[in-house]
């Protein structure tokens, strides 16, 4: 059955499959943990029960998403020993301690205070419970930090030496941790997590606003506040993400020009005024982009801020070191396209909020509902872009993917892959459906003494709510 498929291809597909499932849960829980800390902080500051109602509403969803993220993350560690033992052996002296730091400094913090966050409000007091919520949010951010450190070192390695046995070992841990791409990747990833959460929260709020309008009933204050906070976060974070993504691209051009060439679809180098290819059909065999739609000279201007700047293409990269263009090329355009839609949604929401019509514009609410999954798709597209653009290396320029895999036969890898597919779709499918069911239930109305007008106007929300999601401090 697998005679025509190599064990390496199956191992790569298995890792991609499992990490794709895993990635969507931390991308949601990182932002949601911060959102919960904001909601609880607003409740303590204002005394309005509506914030506590929203806190309890999203806390149940966070608990499920967090649990599924932990379970799927364990599988990722399993694969380092099963399918990628050669990589673990060679890179373990660097990667191992970094992963241990993530467990010691982040996972223990999250798991230690998660129980207090979930069940301790009536047992430990308001302030201590708020501290637990903030510590869980901080823990999720620290966890993201260490994982990004590991991935960034594999992309832009420094502070290492290679021993006689072929193993990498650290010569300067500060250089390993603060490698050239880490700050850009961390910023881009965290902003992506906050956007992902804001879009989900906004979609849930839009769903209930549209449903209430269809049933001819007034929307609950909790629904309006939830929607306003989410749209405010999108309006603030989407432009920041575009800026962070641009700076990340400039950094990648400096350290991984071959990846940028694949992302941009530049098979040929340009001595000056490189075009920006909006769309095309890549052909690696012919080293040519077919049916391309391009804007002259814009590529040089975007990447190097100089319309006359030269650009390196894949023709300057040895054939054996070239990535397959289709994956990073198309995934990058999916990510950018969704980013543009996020900008439009945030700008539209800000305009409607300024006009005092945030809750009356049906079409904007429909767009917010449609954009609910966009954050997940965008972060997956970004991951596909950066990981496939790094190929054929696991440690860029130093350790090839083919040299990283375990010496396994294809049927052995295929057996575990099939098992993962069956279990993942059942377990995580059920979990996801349960989360959607919870989201379909409207938040319990709070603050019955509050007037309807108090919740309708965006300007009536406290400044903290207008800002929306913020990382816990």
Image: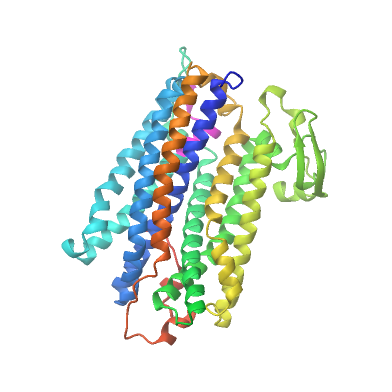
Q: What stretch is highlighted in magenta?
A: 149-161
Q: Is residue 345 left or right of residue 38?
A: right
Examine the rendering and report whether any part of residue 91 can be seen.
Answer: yes
Is 413 or 471 nearer to us in this picture?
413
Q: How many labels does the image show?
A: 0
Quadrant of the rendered image containing residue 85: top left
Determine the residue located farthest toward the left in the rendered image. Answer: 123
Q: Where is residue 309 in the image (x, y as percent from the top left)?
A: 78, 44
Q: Residue placed at 30% from the left, 48% from the top?
A: 110
Q: Residue at x 81, y 48 (%)?
A: 293
Q: Is residue 416 above or below residue 307?
A: above
The spot of residue 342 in percent (x, y) is 59, 61
**210 inside magenta stretch:** no
Residue 241 position in % (x across, y down): 57, 56
Residue 281: image location, x then y, percent:
76, 40
The residue drawn where x is 39% and y is 59% is 34
């Amino acid at each position: 059955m697998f005679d025509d498929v190599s064990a390496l291809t199956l191992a790569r597909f298995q890792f991609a499959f499992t990490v794709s499932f895993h990635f969507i849960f931390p991308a949601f829980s990182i932002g949601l943990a911060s959102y919960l800390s904001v909601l609880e902080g607003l409740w303590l500051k204002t005394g309005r029960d509506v914030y506590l109602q929203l806190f309890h509403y999203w806390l149940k969803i966070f608990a499920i998403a967090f649990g599924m993220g932990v379970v799927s993350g364990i599988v990722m560690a399993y694969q380092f020993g099963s399918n990628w033992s050669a990589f673990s052996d060679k890179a373990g002296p660097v990667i191992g301690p970094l992963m241990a730091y993530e467990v010691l400094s982040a996972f223990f913090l999250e798991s230690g205070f998660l129980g207090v966050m979930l069940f301790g409000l009536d047992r430990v007091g308001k302030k201590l419970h708020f501290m637990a919520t903030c510590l869980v949010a901080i823990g999720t951010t620290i966890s993201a930090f260490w994982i990004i450190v590991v991935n960034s070192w594999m992309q832009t390695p420094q502070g290492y030496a290679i021993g006689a046995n072929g193993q990498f070992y650290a010569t300067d841990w500060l250089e390993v941790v603060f490698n050239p791409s880490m700050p850009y990747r961390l910023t881009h990833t965290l902003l992506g997590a906050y956007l992902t959460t804001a879009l989900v929260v906004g979609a849930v709020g839009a769903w209930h606003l549209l449903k209430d309008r269809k049933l001819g009933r007034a929307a609950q204050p909790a629904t309006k506040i939830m929607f306003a906070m989410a749209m405010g976060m999108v309006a603030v974070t989407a432009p920041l993400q575009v800026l962070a993504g641009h700076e990340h691209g400039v950094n990648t051009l400096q350290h991984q020009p071959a990846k940028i060439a694949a992302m941009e679809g530049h098979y040929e180098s340009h001595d000056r005024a490189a075009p920006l290819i909006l769309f095309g059909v890549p052909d690696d065999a012919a080293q040519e982009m077919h049916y391309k739609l391009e804007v002259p000279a814009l590529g040089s201007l975007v990447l190097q801020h100089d319309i006359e700047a030269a650009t390196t293409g894949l023709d300057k990269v040895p054939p054996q070191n070239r990535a397959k263009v289709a994956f990073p090329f198309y995934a990058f355009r999916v990510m950018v396209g969704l980013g543009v839609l996020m900008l439009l949604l945030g700008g539209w929401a800000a305009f409607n909020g300024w006009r005092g019509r945030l809750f009356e514009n049906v079409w904007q609410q429909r767009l917010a509902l449609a954009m609910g999954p966009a954050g997940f798709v965008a972060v997956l597209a970004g991951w596909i872009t950066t990981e496939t653009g790094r190929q054929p290396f696991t440690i860029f320029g130093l350790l090839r993917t083919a040299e990283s895999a375990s010496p396994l036969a294809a049927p052995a890898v295929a057996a575990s892959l099939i098992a993962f597919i069956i279990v993942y779709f059942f377990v995580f499918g059920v979990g996801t459906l349960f989360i959607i069911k919870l989201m379909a239930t409207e938040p319990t109305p709070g603050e019955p003494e509050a007037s309807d007008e108090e919740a309708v106007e965006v300007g009536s929300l406290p400044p903290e709510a207008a800002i929306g999601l913020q990382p816990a401090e």
